[in-house]
Amino acid sequence: MEIIKHWIGGSPAGSASATAPVFDPATGRIRARVVLGTAADVDAAVTRAAAAFETWSESSLTQRTQVMFAFRQLLVEHEEELARIISAEHGKTVDDARGEIVRGREVVEFACGLGDVLKGSHSDQVSRGVDVHDFRRPLGVAAGITPFNFPAMVPLWMHPIAIATGNTFVLKPSERDPSAAGFVAGLYRRAGLPDGVFNVVHGGKEAVDAILTHPGIEAVSFVGSTPVAQYVHGAATSAGKRVQALGGAKNHAVVLPDADPEFAAGHITAGAYGSAGERCMAVSVAVAVGSAANGLVEALARRAREVKVGPGHVPGVEMGPLITEDARDRVERAVGTAAGQGATVVVDGRGLKPDGHPECADGFFTGPSLLDHVTPEMDAYRQELFGPVLAVVRVDTLDEAIDLINANPYGNGTALFTGSGEAARRFQRKVQVGMIGVNVPVPVPMSYYSFGGWKDSLIGDSPVHGPEGVRFYTRPKVVTTRWPRPARQDAAGFAFPTSA
């Protein structure tokens, strides 16, 4: 059986003394084992990264840009291979995996242009013969702790910007689908990135805690659940590190009576059940306003029943299995709990097995479920289910919908389906959510904007990628300069300096 090792200093590393299984979620079988890193493994990676920082931080912008351009091209050339690796370990469809690679590659393209973003400013003659300029410097060794649901995209939101700004990087990917990280490491090496600049350490809590407390790591980026994000933020900031910590979500899509119910239902269905709902930007609540409710629920039910469920590598499949057996069981229990608390189970996906795929009898499948008449007091509304369950909440007005969203502890993403510009403008100004879509169900910003929610969806105040990512991985230096003439020495004064 394949043993998936760390990537430290430009080559595989780590003994197989402690490993964890890596499953094929479509069949339920173990396909590989991944080495579980220790504090010593983290220290080895940081040591190599720190040594590489001494030279990489002094590399030219041209050199860094050339590496990023080459890396971007390799991602294009190997998109299919990487997508199939992701699909085999995560369970999402190959098409969906291609999509996450493209969205991650957009950040690499942003990093290719950092020469312009990193330009400093200059102020001439702020005082007699005195000029001021500033520039940004890399921090040192940065680390990323990333989730299972996007094994390529979320790390690509972090390390290209960190590396292009002159830092070195240690990635701790999810142990559930670890192979994408090693594949990307190999692409970096082929792109000309020096050994030690990008490293991968697999593992669980021991590796995470070692990253959070290691004195050689200057910054930590994290994406995951809110409780873990709070833990990461607290531990890492206590250790004096910069922290990006993105947490959970409960994303609402509001449908007004003037919206086309078929258009809204089609996009909400894709946003709710794509990747089996295992997205932090998944639509988990449809808020039906007034007379929109009955037609919307009817259209959502029809489309939910039409979703093609099966193994992710099969052409035409739209939704694959969940990542683990426990994840599937948790989601199916949530549907039963919702029914017990008074919700109407319009479409029940529990117990689904893909037709025509006997090899998937033990896979971690469940079908799309649709719940109607859900209220904010129910578990199906309060909890982040992270599965293919869509809850419909009925309200009378747009203002009620906004109040509902604003009362929710999460504030990651939201959407409004309408033909009214006035309603859209009111919604986007009043709703307390960081990323908003108007007739767009999954409003993930482009790479030249930053990704981050509000409230419990973002612990601290540092979003990822885009301009905020550049600021996170660098710090400014401000230089005040005087060049006196050789024949004239300006007198030094003991009073606090002022402009004159």
Image (cartoon, rainbow, N blue to C red):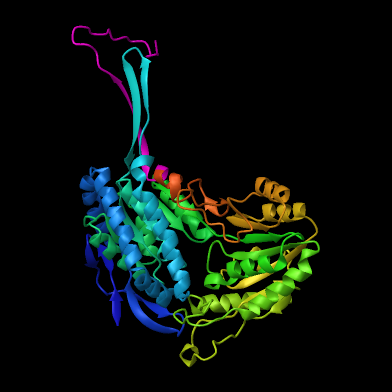
Residue found at the very far left of the displayed protein = 486
Viewport quadrant of the C terminus: top left
Could you tell me if residue 212 is visible in this image?
Answer: no
Residue ID at (33%, 58%)? 72
For residue 1, above or below residue 63:
below
Q: Position of residue 128 (x, y in %)?
A: 34, 12
Q: Is residue 271 magenta-colored?
A: no
Number of marks in picture: 0
Question: Which of the two residues, 18 or 407, is positioned nearer the viewer here?
Answer: 407
Residue ID at (23%, 42%)? 58
What secondary structure predominates along the stretch shown in magenta?
A: loop
Q: Position of residue 266 (x, y in %)?
A: 64, 69
Residue ID at (55%, 78%)? 328
Question: Which of the two residues, 434 or 175, is positioned nearer the viewer here?
Answer: 434
For residue 291, above or below residue 114:
below
Horizontal relation, residue 91 to residue 404: left or right? left
Q: Position of residue 458 (x, y in %)?
A: 53, 52
- Quarter where residue 379 is shown: bottom right
Residue ID at (32%, 49%)? 164
- Quarter where residue 289 is shown: bottom right
Q: Is residue 477 magenta-colored?
A: yes
Viewport quadrant of the N terminus: bottom left
Could you tell me if residue 355 is visible in this image?
Answer: yes
- Quarter where residue 41 is shown: bottom left
Instruction: Look at the image and give the residue range highlighted in magenta.
Output: 471-500
Q: Position of residue 52 (x, y in %)?
A: 22, 51
Question: Which of the two residues, 172 or 391, is positioned nearer the viewer here?
Answer: 391
